[in-house]
Image (tube, coloured by chain):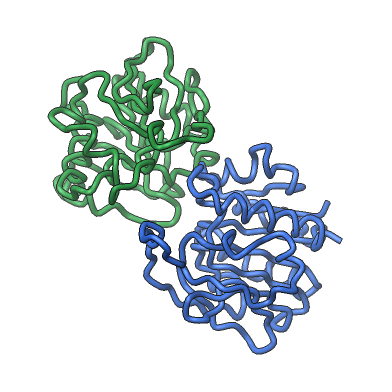
Chain colours: A green, B blue
Amino acid sequence: MSVLFVNAHSGMTEALFDQAEAEGKLRRVRQRDLTAAHFAEASGLITTMYLDQVGFLQHGESIQALLGRGGRWIFSGHMLRPPIPSLGIYVPLADPRRSDFALTRLSEHPIFAGIDQKALELNRGVAGFYGRGHNPMPQDATAINGLGPQNLPIDWDWVRPDGGCIFSHAGNDFWHNGDDVALHQVLADRAVAWAAGDRDR
Amino acid sequence: MSILAVHPGTFYHIESLEAPRYAGMFDRLVRPEDLQDVRLEDFRVVLIPCRTPAERMIAHAAQLRAYLDQGGTVIATGENDWAHYLPAIRFTPQETNWWWWLTPGADLGVQITAPGHALFKRLTRDDLSWHMHGWFDVPDGAEVLAVNESGRPILYIDTVTTNGRMILTSLDPFYHHGSHFMPATTRFLDGFLGWMREDLDR
């Protein structure tokens, strides 16, 4: 089984995931072509900021089934149309200042192990690309990275009582942040490994 | 019933089209796949926001053309492959300088070419200045409202190709506003959508 990566309607592809797909770890499917079988055949799921969230609602049962058998889902973006229960609606920062974009590691996580979160805070010296708000955490979720002085949970993961695990990132796709291009590939590879269940929580 | 907006469903579309700030600007939202079930003639304006995948619009090209030919108005904003579903679009992408504003005193170079147009009672040059994505070769007789640093059209109105009106821009305000990113894009939409509602919906 491989990780199901939902490609946007535009057909835009992510070169960072080419190698994983070539190695059979990942299967990319355009959103318009998604069927229940794709979810049933997957060990994990990755969706990006370009997800058609309105259209994705039709796959709620398939997502629940994937998670229910222990699958993992990486959601990257602003959650505005939760396709399954217990997920909240994205909360943007109000009138943010530079200090509100500071990132702080709150808990260790395999995707970020050994990576200084500060390396993802700036693009060309500009903060705010990583994210400008948070997707509310479900009860019993674990905050991974905090945003601003309040450490709003911009990244969290949640071991669901009904099975499976969700990792949420509330911003631009996290594997594209920071100025270190090599780090982008590391994050993409780790995202695939985590979604596949190959990396311990 | 007057303003119809196409709703592709990405978070920046949901925020831009459904959140309270602009929700009242649209009388109906329609998924691209459902366009064939809508009588476009019932609407004064059909708006196609930034980053609406062309593959979801191509099937509706004839419907849009018929709507234009009976006098309708189509607005389409940036980062779209308009030529796949709208007539007489000739677009040249340009490399986007995302970082121009980091240079003190820098000027993106946008110029308003029709300062007397009603739209510019609501918008200033700064409200059109965030990024450049490319320019249009417009048909003879089209009204160019703004140009890029090279004097190439980035916002224009075409009333010559069809019996209706096409308002095209390579600026991408819905994407950035819906991402809570660029204040200029919110100012642009404040003015542009206000103009759309009050001047085009008549």
Q: Nearer the viewer, residue B15 or A22?
A: B15
| Picture coordinates of residue B59, whole percent (x, y) | 58, 64
Residue farthest front in this picture: B105
| Picture coordinates of residue B200, whole percent (x, y) | 79, 63
Q: Nearer the viewer, residue B185 or A56?
A: B185
Up-down: is A115 above or below B188? Answer: above
Residue farthest bottom in this picture: B140
Q: Residue at x 81, y 62 (%)?
A: B199
Where residue A198 sits, quadrant-wise, is: top left
Up-down: is A23 above or below A113? Answer: below
Left or right: A71, with B90 as reference point: left
Q: Residue at x 54, y 45 (%)?
A: B178
Q: Residue at x 18, y 26 (%)?
A: A110
| Picture coordinates of residue B44, whole percent (x, y) | 80, 61
Left or right: A35, with B20 as reference point: left
Q: Residue at x 80, y 58 (%)?
A: B43
Left or right: A176, with A50 as reference point: left
| Picture coordinates of residue A127, whole percent (x, y) | 35, 42
- Image quadrant where one finds the N terminus of chain A: top left
- Image quadrant where one finds the C terminus of chain A: top left
Where residue A4 sits, quadrant-wise, is: top left
Number of marks? 0
